[in-house]
Image: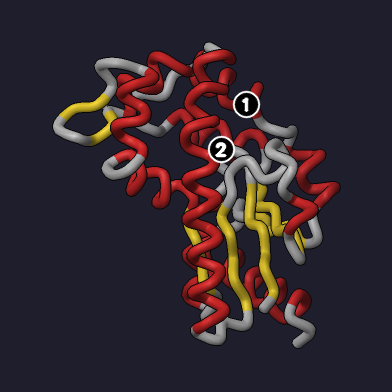
Amino acid sequence: MIVIGLTGSIGMGKSTTARLFAEEGAAVHDADAAVHALYAGEAAPLIEAAFPGTVRNGVVDRKELGMRVLGQPEALAKLEAIVHPLVRAAESAFLEKARAQGAKVAVLDVPLLFETGRADRMDAVVVVSAGEAEQRGRVMERPGMTEAMFQSILARQTPDAEKRARADVVIDTSRGVEDARAQVRRALAKLSGG
């Protein structure tokens, strides 16, 4: 089984691209979905203990938690120390299950693949990119997004140009979904030797 690390900066189209890989038959693990599940499950009491008042009815209030950690490196590191090991455990379980089911390709959707030093553990790295203007437009359309939040997120991410330079394959999402789908098909053919 080939394990592909899928990554890209905020607003580049990574979630859509992950869906396209799934539609082409790859087993896909979505880190954001895993975090959502953890925030409503085993991570909630750990986060409440570290950041009192951030859990409501057993579920982490992402907005409240975001206000506590964005732009606060120590608080963010504290949160990541709780969440990252749980996400990695979910990924490991996913890969085990994919292997057992005979998957030929597994895609790990990892937002901070380079930043967390995990790119070298993948068989291949696919980076999703769309260009700076497209990225900004997409991100600033998100509810509640501010310029300060956007800049804070960008500051934590490896620059797009560096990600593209380190990728085995780059998927350009600036030309629409059908074009991206064609690129995903070519990537799968290239990376699986087909």
Dot 1 falls on a residue whose secondary structure is: helix
Which image quarter: residue 41? top left
Image point (33%, 39%), residue name: 39
Residue at position x 49%, y 72% in the image: 22
Q: Quadrant of the N terminus?
A: bottom right
- Total labels drawn: 2
Determine the residue positioned at 62% across, 34% down.
Answer: 133
Mark 1 and mark 2: Cα distance apart in space:
8 Å
Q: Is residue 126 above or below residue 78?
A: below
Residue at mark 2:
10
Instruction: Describe residue 142's horizontal placement relative to residue 71 as left or right.
Output: left
Left or right position of 143 against 189: left
For residue 188, say whether it is visible: yes
Q: Amino acid at mark 1?
A: Leu
* Looking at the image, residue 97 lies above or below residue 31: below
Residue 73 quadrant: top right
Of the numbered discs 1 and 2, the one sitting upstream in the chain is 2
In the rendering, at what x and y percent does residue 72 appear? 53, 12
Query: How far across and down, in percent of the image, does residue 184 sit?
Result: 63, 70
10 Å neighbourhood of mark 2: few (<14), some, or many (≥20)? many
Q: Residues within 10 Å of mark 1 (few under 14, many from 20)?
A: some
In the picture, the disc for residue 24 is: none
| Disc number placed over residue 154 in the picture, else none | 1
**Contact between labelled residues 2 and 1, with CB atoms less than 8 Å apart:** yes
